[in-house]
Amino acid sequence: MKKALLLLLFIIPSLAVSQSLGKERINKLNNTVVKITIDSLPNSGTGFVVSKSGIIVTCEHLIRRGYYYNKETNLVDSTRSIKAHFSNGKVIDMLIVDAFMKNEIERITGIVYDYILLKPKENTNKDYDYLKIGKWKEINVGDEVYTAGFPLIEKAIVVSKGILSSKLDDINKLRKTDGKYYNIRYNTSWADISSGKGNSGAPLIRLGDNYDDDIVVGIVFRNMNPFVDNLQKHIDVNKDLNKKDTTIDPTTNKTISFILETLAYNYYGFAGANPAENILTALQLLNQ
C-alpha cells in the first residue's frame, strides 16, 4: 500500500506537467510558425507571423548571413533571396521591412535583441493568422511556456513545452563603423524547453488559460548544452592536432572530426530567449 501511494506521488505531478497543449494551439502554430531559408545558404531558421498583413519576425543573426555590404560605407546594400515555408507547403518570398533598416534606433534594437521584421514580397491582400505579442513583465520565472520551430535535423515543425527557468540581464558587445566596440545591457532568459540548431527565431509563448490568452513573450535565439560546448573544444583541438601532427592518419582524423561535428551540430539543449515586446514598437511604426 505504501509503495502504491509513493508511486502515485510521482505519477500525479508528472501527469500535470505533461498536459496536452490541445488541437487549437497546435493548429495555431502550424498556421503561424514558418521555416526561414536564405538563397544558396545551407542552414535555415524559424520565424513566426505577427500581423494580419503577413509580417514575420525572425532572428537578425540568421538574416545577417545573407547581407550584401557596400564596400565603401560598410552598410547593407541588399540581401539574398529570403523565403518563408509554411507547414501547409506554401512558400512565400520575403523582404526586410524598409522602415526597420532605415530607422537607426530600431535597427540597433534589433541587433541587441536579435530580431528582424520581414514582409511578403507580393501584397496578396490576404489576412494571415498571427501570434499576439506580450510584454516582458507578463512572464515570471516558473511560468509554463512552449515553443515551435524547425531544427535542422527535422523536416517538420517540432513543438516543446516547459517553464521559464530564469530572467536576467546580459551585455551585448556592438561594433561601431569606426571599428570600436561598446557594451549595451539588455534583458534575456533561459527556458527549460528543447531547442536545437534551426530553432533561432522561434516564438517563446506563455501558456494561458486557453489558446486565446497565450502571448509571445520571447524570441529563441540560442541554445545551451554543456556537453556540446565541451565537444566544440574537442573539435577545435582535433583540427589543431591535424595541422601540427603529420603522423595522424588523415582518414581516421576525418572520421573523428565527422563524428564530433555531427554530435555538435545536431543536438537539443536549453533555449535562450530575448524579450519580444520590442516588436510591438516596431509594428507601431508600420501601423500594424
Image (cartoon, rainbow, N blue to C red):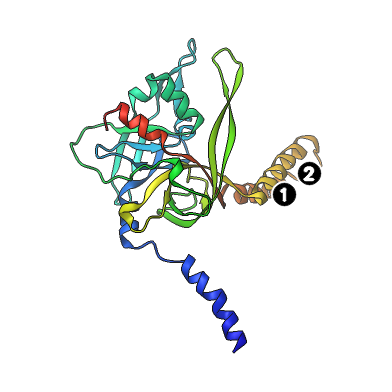
Q: Give the side of residue 269 with respect to residue 138, left or right.
A: right
Residue 252 badge: 1
Which residue occupies the extreme bottom position in the image? 1
Say few, some or many: other residues with alpha carbon within 10 Å of mark 2 (under 14 / 14 to 19 / 20 or more): few
Question: Image quadrant for the N terminus?
Answer: bottom right
The front one of 174 and 67 is 174
The front one of 250 and 22 is 22
Where is 286 relative to 211, above or below? above
Identify the residue position indicated by label 2 in the image. 248
Q: Amino acid at mark 2?
A: Ile
The front one of 154 and 215 is 215
Residue 39 in view (yes/no): no
SS for callout 2: loop
Q: Quadrant of residue 245?
A: top right
Q: CA distance from mark 2 to mark 1?
A: 8 Å
The front one of 257 and 187 is 187
Q: Quadrant of residue 44?
A: top left
Q: Are marks 2 and 1 in contact (CB under 8 Å)?
A: yes
Q: Position of residue 263 (x, y in %)?
A: 62, 51
SS for callout 1: helix
